[in-house]
Image: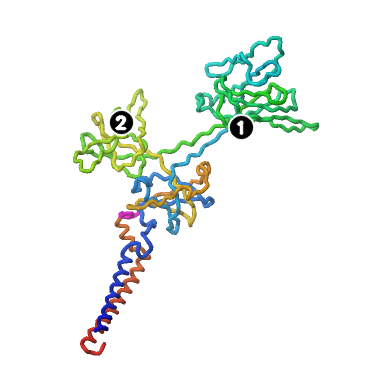
Amino acid sequence: MFVFLGRRRSAGMILMLSLAAAAAVATPGLAVGGPGDSPDDYAHLMPVSVSGRQAVVQLQLPREVYLGARSNDLRDLRLFDAAGTPMPFSLVERVRQEQVSKSTAPAAVFPVRAPAGARQGLPDGLQIRTREDGAVISVTAPAARGVRDELASLVLDIQPPAQQAGANAREKERPAVSALALTLPPALDSYNARLALDTSDDLQHWEPLTEAPVSWLVNSQGASVRKDRIEFAPRRFRYARIAWLEGKPVEFAAIAAELVTSTRAPQPWENVVLSAAPGKAGDDLVYAAPLAIPVQAVGLVFHTQNVVLPAQVGQYREQPGLKRAGDLEPVASATFYQLTQNGQGRVSGDVEVPLTHAAQWVLRPQAKLLDRPELRLLWKPATIVFVAGGKGPYTLAFGRDGAQPAYQPLDQVAPGFSPPELAALEQARSGTPIRQPEGTGGATNRLAGVFSRREFWLWVLLLCGVAALALMAWRLTRQLKDESSGQPPA
């Protein structure tokens, strides 16, 4: 009897192990080391190509990513190499590259004379006349009384070039000055001095900027060496004053200011136009929108001419247990229009709104609707910075329910990169998006993913093992029955 129970217990253990193995394979992740994450798990795939010469590259997210992603923070975004291995990437706002241009502008030079030995500062009673735009007309020193005057300093009026004067009229838009280039009078070949440079914006208050030596040297063979520039960190100012710390003051034949202008490339906008459906209250119109879009501006697209429509745009206020429908939480209120006057079209611009993610937008007209306008949503796309490792080409995958975020901090993807270096990263190229069969990326696909190629063979091996174990259990059971009945085992 002891042997009978022991063998039966062994047969039971065999069956339990078989069931446990089947459950391990039937449960995604237990037999293969965690939930699957491959391009087949996502509803949309987009090829991405790089030159292969740079380790870290960037890609501005295409419009299709925002239309197909299923989360408001793009947590279902992935980047795979050709072997299906996930690649590290960081999701950042677009790093705009600054474009630096240099130009020169002649400075109007006004000599300031003072009694001998009085070289510091401007003499008392100095009169400086200016035009309405601030341009210096004249600099007049007080009349000397029996004292010989000599050159003490130079006052400079630095005006932007004519093509920049209109755009840089205001102080904050004035180009920065990075250096002053000096030209000696024709009668001088060699000259040495040490100069002090002060700056001002109102000709009343002066701030020291820098001190610099200048020199022109000519040898007997006519070769020359010169240091004819006063250089400093770019700074915006309108007026400057040159005074001599060492050397004899001279009136330079010309002084030119070297200007530096930095402009940022405008950040592009993406947009999508949505069709209307009836809302919950009154003349409300609702628009189904992709949740991933970070809406930053809205506008209306009319299908008729000469229409003016004051309206509110927002979302219905959802409160648990509240049966009342139609409460609107507006994010923008404006008058939208499309008119033709004197043969010229006039269309209302887009209205900026606080950054909003919403699966549904509501338009509440404040006047009678003549048609159902479409709603335009606008946003500024983000950029992914990624390490071009593995084997290309790469695949951008998106569109999966319940995915966990995969993006990493920027310093873990591009460590030590400065903002100018990030802005200058190579731009990857995206191809035509591919939509996978219906159900991909959701719960249905996660169940169907169990039957991937690798797991198919695991199932085959498991079924063979279960069949063998079942045969062994059957034979053991037959043997136990034969022993209990006293018959010789078959």
At x 28%, y 72%, the residue is 16
Q: Is residue 100 above or below residue 75?
A: above
Residue 163 horizontal/vertical position (percent): 54, 26
Label 1 crowding class (10 Å Cα cut-off): few <14, some 14-19, many 20+? some
- The answer to whether one can see residue 474 in this image is no
Q: Is residue 129 magenta?
A: no
Q: Is residue 439 magenta?
A: yes
Q: Are marks 2 and 1 in contact (CB under 8 Å)?
A: no
Label 2 crowding class (10 Å Cα cut-off): few <14, some 14-19, many 20+? some
Residue 34 horizontal/vertical position (percent): 37, 60
Q: Is residue 145 left or right of residue 301?
A: right
- Tell me which secondary structure the magenta stretch mostly adopts: loop
In magenta, the rendered stretch is 436-442
Where's the C terminus, which quadrant? bottom left
Q: Is residue 241 left or right of residue 271?
A: right
Residue tagged by mark 2?
A: 333
Residue tagged by mark 1?
A: 232
Q: Residue furthest left?
A: 323
At x 33%, y 63%, the residue is 451
Where's the N terminus, which quadrant? bottom left
At x 33%, y 44%, the residue is 291
Q: Is residue 319 left or right of residue 73?
A: left
User: Residue flagged by tag 2: what amino acid is it?
Assistant: Ser
